[in-house]
Amino acid sequence: MSCERIVLTVWTTATRATRGWGGLLWFWLVWPTLGMAGGVDVSQAPKHDSGWSYFHDAVPEIPWSIHIFRIDRAHRELEFCTTLGGTNTLGMSTVSQQIKQLPRELGQPLAAINGDFYNKSENYPGDPRDLQICQGELVSGPTGHACFWVDTDGNPQTTNVLSRFKVVWADGTATAFGLNEERPSDGAVLYTAALGRSTHTSGGLELVLERTSTNLWLPLRVGQTYQARVRAVRRFGDTPLDADFLVLSFGPGIAARLPKAGPGTILRIMTETVPDLKGLTAAIGGGPTLVRNGKAMQWSGFQMRHPRTAIGWNKEHIFMVEVDGRQGQLSVGMTFAELAAYMIKLGCQQAVNLDGGGSATLWVCGNVMNNPSEGQERPGANALVLVRKNSEDSGPGRAASRVAPSAAPRPSATE
């Protein structure tokens, strides 16, 4: 079933839902609201060959307004990809804007949710807090939080991902680095053209790296080792970026302690992670983990209710979920514990939280289905998008991550 066929139906239900939840006539692609107090019985969803369904769940006594997009994992033509707020570079834009810039060859976008938390600084707006892989390109490195991806066998996964990024010098010593982020005064960051026009740094030491005679080169991929030659050394910062070069930048506090390297020096750039994510075409950061092996994680201390976004799954289905909040007459939002309990009621064996608050958004076939807490979509760093691939586009070398059916989930680490 195409988006064009149902867009009017989705828009009608979404518009009427903003005016009151009672007495709605739900069409066959959405099934009735099933308040959490009685449990969410997804078995009531109609059967059809589209591979997905959207529905709205209202719990007026709290109140909660929850939007759910359910994906049938048996449909191999449905795949995930991620987007960037600057289209081809890091930046800030709404989920709707990011989908408009999605390359057509990735497939037809069906649904999307907002992605990771992000940096709001002047020089690095839209820098994701954690890992992001976009169309196979590694654009942001992991910082230890929970991330979501679909592995090379088509199985959704979530766990805390650790960076083992490092440059190995000619003398065999190594220095860890971050990726496309604000450089600490005593640290190192590798910059690619995904950041934008330049490194936006000041002072320190920057090595412009070019390709050697080896075949492996850009765009940067996760889990790889690159051999690079120093092309130039700069000591003023703000080095221009280009798709053919890398820039390895060192803050003033570490630059004096580095091994000697000048034009012609050969270095090795390593993008290893724990766990090993080599071969992924799409991944996005988030956290914390909400559900692991069917059990809710535990949180201590006072918990606040906020708008939330999450993704969860079991052997048959994946659920993209958005909970409206900060709107007393419509929906007050959820705590992490409440969201974890809700994902379990949906049937999720695994689930992970994504950015929430004013960023919380669920987009379906051209329409924002929820009521953003700020009255309109908030620009964010990235999004997680479900697309329908043409049959001839699926297979090895695809640009998005295919979802496999009935795959046993691996244990997810806590955050």
Image: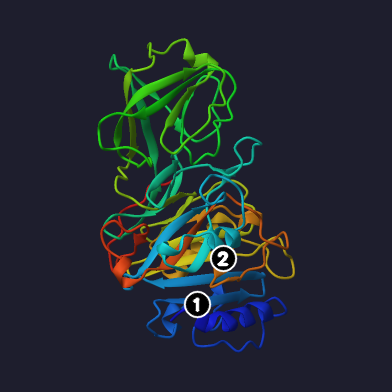
**Image spot of residue 395 (x, y percent):** 27, 63
Which sits in the foreground, 259 or 302? 259
On screen, residue 395 versus residue 88, left or right, reads: left
Reply above or below: 293 against 143.
below
- Are the residues at dot 1 and dot 2 in contact (C-beta closer than 8 Å)? no
**Quadrant housing the C terminus:** top left
The secondary element bearing badge 1 is classed as: helix
On screen, residue 264 versus residue 304, left or right, reads: left
Name the quadrant containing residue 405.
Answer: bottom left
Dot 2, crowdedness within 10 Å: few (<14), some or many (≥20)? many
Name the quadrant containing residue 313.
Answer: bottom left
**Quadrant housing the N terminus:** bottom left
Q: Amino acid at mark 1?
A: Cys
Name the quadrant containing residue 374.
Answer: bottom right
Numbered tag placed on residue 362 in the rendering:
2
Which sits in the foreground, 71 or 261? 261
Specify whether residue 1 is in view: yes
Reply above or below: 294 against 390.
above
**Image spot of residue 68 (x, y percent):** 52, 71
Which sits in the foreground, 264 or 112? 264
**Image spot of residue 129 (x, y percent):** 52, 42
Numbered tag placed on residue 371 in the rendering:
none
Residue denoted by label 1: 3
Q: Amino acid at mark 2?
A: Leu
**Image spot of residue 158 (x, y percent):** 39, 52
Reply above or below: 133 against 268.
below
Sequence order check, earlier mark of 1 and 2:
1
Specify whether residue 351 is in view: no
The secondary element bearing badge 2 is classed as: strand
Q: Residue at x 36, y 66 (%)?
A: 314
Q: Nearer the viewer, mark 1 or mark 2?
A: 1
How far is mark 1 from mark 2, CA to CA? 15 Å
